[in-house]
């Protein structure tokens, strides 16, 4: 057994973590690894002062990655040191093994990183089912908490930023979402859609060259005050949306200019279903509008009359 333990140290722990395997106990469902730390000193997490004075020791039980379909539990004996700095508010502290443990953690860092990868790939419910498949039972809430604990990724300041509103509670509470247009990734969320809030955010990022924004007045004012050097443009979605609304209103105003095509002689006029008589889908606000009262004989399409073009036509 003494010849096998050094090989287990290299297999279970890297050589620079300062952990030595004492005993391995295998049952039908669990592999329990008893280990201890071997470092001679540790640094205080508050003041950073190194200490070699040991106050005591205790056991930590950490879940590790499964082995041959069995749950692995590391029973690690760690020590508590006395801080040598008299001015430090922390009198004692427990040592942490880099790459293996963290404060108040019940999982090894390699198991934690594996669960985070599963959560990022499959999210909550599907990730929990996948974790149960390789004998690491966790709940969907645990996976979501692990994802939420990740630090925000380091990103470069955007050059082209998109500004629009989002609803926290539709019709009552709105905020501002900012997106990096070049990478198509969200940058930040502002709690409201006030011009002063947007101006303060833009003023902290002088490298912004283009602001692609909604046509709201408060967004225009905030972009002008916060980034006067930036070029303001309207985003493509709002341009198409406004164009569609304008075309819809224009067609509705000129319904009186349209005339029905008479049926060719000798052909039986097919009975038209009521749903096909309207170009708008069922329930549309223009589909339920009353038909124009102008008789077909006085309709002016094409727009040529004795008095000139029809005043309601496009001519």
Image: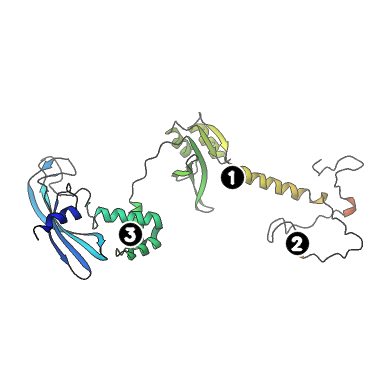
64 sits left or right of 207 in the view = left
Q: CA distance from mark 3 to mark 1?
A: 38 Å
Image point (86%, 41%), residue name: 309
Disc 2 is placed on an element classified as helix
The image position of residue 34, as x and y in percent, is 14, 60
Q: Is residue 21 visible?
A: no
Question: Considering only order in the chain, which callout, 1 or 2, is on the residue closer to the N terminus?
Answer: 1
Image point (20%, 65%), residue name: 31
Q: Which residue is mark 1?
A: 237
Image point (39%, 39%), residue name: 155
Disc 3 is placed on an element classified as helix
The image position of residue 8, as x and y in percent, is 16, 56
- Contact, mark 2 vs mark 1 (Cβ under 8 Å): no
Q: CA distance from mark 2 to mark 1?
A: 30 Å
Q: Which residue is mark 3?
A: 142
The quadrant of the image that shows the N terminus is bottom left
Q: CA distance from mark 3 to mark 2?
A: 54 Å
């Amino acid at each position: 057994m003494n010849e096998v333990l050094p090989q287990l140290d290299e297999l279970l722990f890297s050589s620079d973590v300062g952990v030595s395997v004492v005993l391995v106990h295998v049952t039908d469902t669990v592999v329990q690894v008893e280990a201890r730390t071997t470092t001679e000193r540790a640094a205080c997490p508050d003041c950073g002062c190194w200490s070699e004075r040991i106050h005591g020791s205790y056991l930590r039980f950490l879940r590790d990655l499964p082995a041959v379909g069995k749950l692995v539990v590391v029973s690690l004996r760690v020590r508590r040191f006395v801080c040598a700095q008299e001015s430090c508010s922390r009198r004692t502290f427990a040592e942490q093994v880099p790459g293996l443990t963290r404060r108040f953690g019940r999982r090894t860092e390699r198991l934690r990183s594996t669960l985070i990868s599963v959560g990022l790939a499959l999210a909550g419910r599907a990730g929990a089912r996948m974790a149960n498949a390789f004998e690491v039972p966790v709940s969907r809430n645990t996976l979501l908490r692990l994802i939420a604990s990740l630090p925000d990724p380091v990103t470069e300041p955007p050059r082209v930023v998109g500004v629009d509103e989002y609803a926290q509670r539709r019709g009552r509470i709105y905020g501002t979402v900012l997106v990096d247009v070049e990478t198509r990734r969200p940058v930040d969320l502002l709690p409201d859609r006030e011009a002063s809030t947007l101006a303060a955010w833009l003023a902290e990022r002088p490298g912004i060259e283009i602001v692609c924004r909604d046509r709201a007045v408060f967004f225009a004012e905030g972009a002008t005050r916060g980034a006067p050097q930036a070029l303001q443009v309207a985003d493509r979605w709002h341009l198409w949306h406004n164009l569609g609304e304008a075309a819809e209103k224009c067609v509705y105003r000129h319904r009186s200019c349209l005339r029905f095509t008479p049926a060719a002689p000798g052909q039986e006029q097919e009975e038209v279903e009521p749903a096909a008589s309207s170009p708008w889908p069922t329930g549309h606000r223009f589909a339920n509008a009353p038909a124009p009262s102008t008789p077909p004989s006085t309709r002016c399409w094409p727009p040529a009359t004795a008095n000139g073009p029809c005043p309601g036509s496009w001519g």
